[in-house]
Image (tube, rainbow, N blue to C red):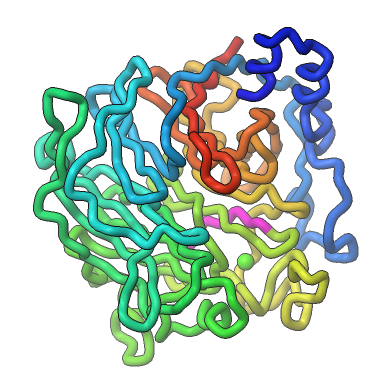
Amino acid sequence: MKHLTLLQTGSVIAAMLIALPAYAQTAGKPAETKRANAPTQKPAFTGQTRAPQPAELVDIKTEVVADDLPHLWAMEFLPDGRMLVTAKQGAMHIVSKEGEAGPRIEGVPKVLASGQGGLLDVALAPDFATSGLIFFSFSEEREGGNGTSVALAKLVPDQQGGGKLENVKVIFQQMPSYDGNKHFGSRLVFGPNKELYVTVGERSDAEPRVQAQDLNSGLGKVFRIDMNGKALPDNPFVNRQDARPEIWSLGHRNLQSATLDGQGRLWTVEHGPRGGDELNRPQAGKNYGWPEVTYGIEYSGAKVGQGITQRAETEQPVYYWDPVIAPSGMAYYDHDAIPEWKGAFLIGGLVSQGIVVVHMDGDEVRHEERVDLDERIRDVKVGPDGAVYAVTEQRGGGDSTIVRLTKS
Ligand SMILES: [Ca+2]
């Protein structure tokens, strides 16, 4: 990381300046101290934003465990402790426990690597140990534009640390296609009964984004499908003629963070506009508001729509951030290695440049803690050792690293 490099070159003063956290790490006070973009907006309930930090902040040690990696988007631990990673330009690699990336895995389909698009998330099938099946999401070039798609393949590793994908099959396409390069999402999360949640975006521009409210459109939704890409029979809109049956929840902006909690329930964090990132627990058939009801403002400074933050038929976020953290990657911490974090959500921050630790009390946020990593964080996972692993990225697409966080 930057400050480690500077320390090695002996520039101690510069290192101290850069190592200063971007926020005030004072126990009991909110981590965020900057002015909100929408200061007149008020939370719907106490504790919905700027929750205080815990009384005792965990002293975290970091080390780079893999570097010189291509621009990564996602990582997943394999059962043998190696890491399967996706690179945004359209490659997959297996990273050894020693941090060495193997050769490119053969057979990865062509992806549209443009703007925010590329090879995105990867998830192991629940029966991966015996089937070798993986699922991955990517931006797919199509007639009339592009969109997020999900593919299934068998990963066949070789003896040289690489391998190949066999029987690659696209099982799901977010429709309609749209000719743009923003807000593709996405994350893939398996529920406890092999149901696959797929999160996407609403393609950002004024014309497509309103479709987040349209049940006939796949933009701005969370989907719930089976391993063949089909809607599950108990999905909320399966019996409606005017709705896509794969939809689980609607009214989302751009979802790049998702995980299950300890009860097997889906939680997500979505990118808001300027201010308005939000933590939700998406439930069947519910409407999360975008773009009609939201915190934050347009990048231009204008109101979003009517500037409404509450409406009876839309769900309030469990928690929101203004200014934004720019969330990407999320994990639920359920290990004893860092006991203070047990039961917390760990969220990667691209703009906040670190890990946002959200401590829960039931389904409400009690504390928000931040770990400054001085790098844009694209993905977060908990390792088999209970350490936290963060994937860094550079704006514009330079090399990525994987950083391990442990308790000092
Ligand atoms: Ca919302």
Q: Quadrant of the N terminus?
A: top right
State which quadrant residue 367 falls in: top right
Q: Is residue 393 left or right of residue 373?
A: left
Question: Residue 19, percent across and down?
Answer: 75, 22
Residue at 74% x, 62% y is 274
Q: Can you say whether 308 is above or below 78 in the image?
A: below
Based on the picture, tell me whether residue 2 belongs to the magenta stretch: no
Q: Residue at x 46, y 70 (%)?
A: 221
Residue 224, percent from left and from top: 33, 64
Observer-nearest of 155 and 72:
72
Q: Is residue 207 above or below residue 343?
A: below
Q: Quadrant of the C terminus?
A: top right
Q: Is residue 328 visible?
A: yes
Comparing 166 with 228, the one in front is 166
The count of marks equals 0
- Residue shown at the point (71%, 21%) measured from the top left: 57
Judge whether 121 appears above or below 384 on screen: below
Can residue 286 be seen at all in this image of the molecule? no
Task: Report the magenta residues as a range.
Answer: 277-283
280 left or right of 156 in image: right
Q: Looking at the picture, does residue 230 appear above or below residue 25?
A: below
- 319, 78: nearer the viewer: 78
Query: Where is residue 227, by image quadrant?
Result: bottom left
Q: Position of residue 122 (x, y in %)?
A: 33, 47
Q: Which residue is located at x 82 percent, y 22 percent?
A: 17
Q: Residue furthest bottom?
A: 241
The quarter of the picture showing ligand 1: bottom right
Q: Position of residue 277 (x, y in %)?
A: 66, 56
Left or right: residue 320 versus residue 35 is left
- Is residue 282 a member of the stretch shown in magenta? yes
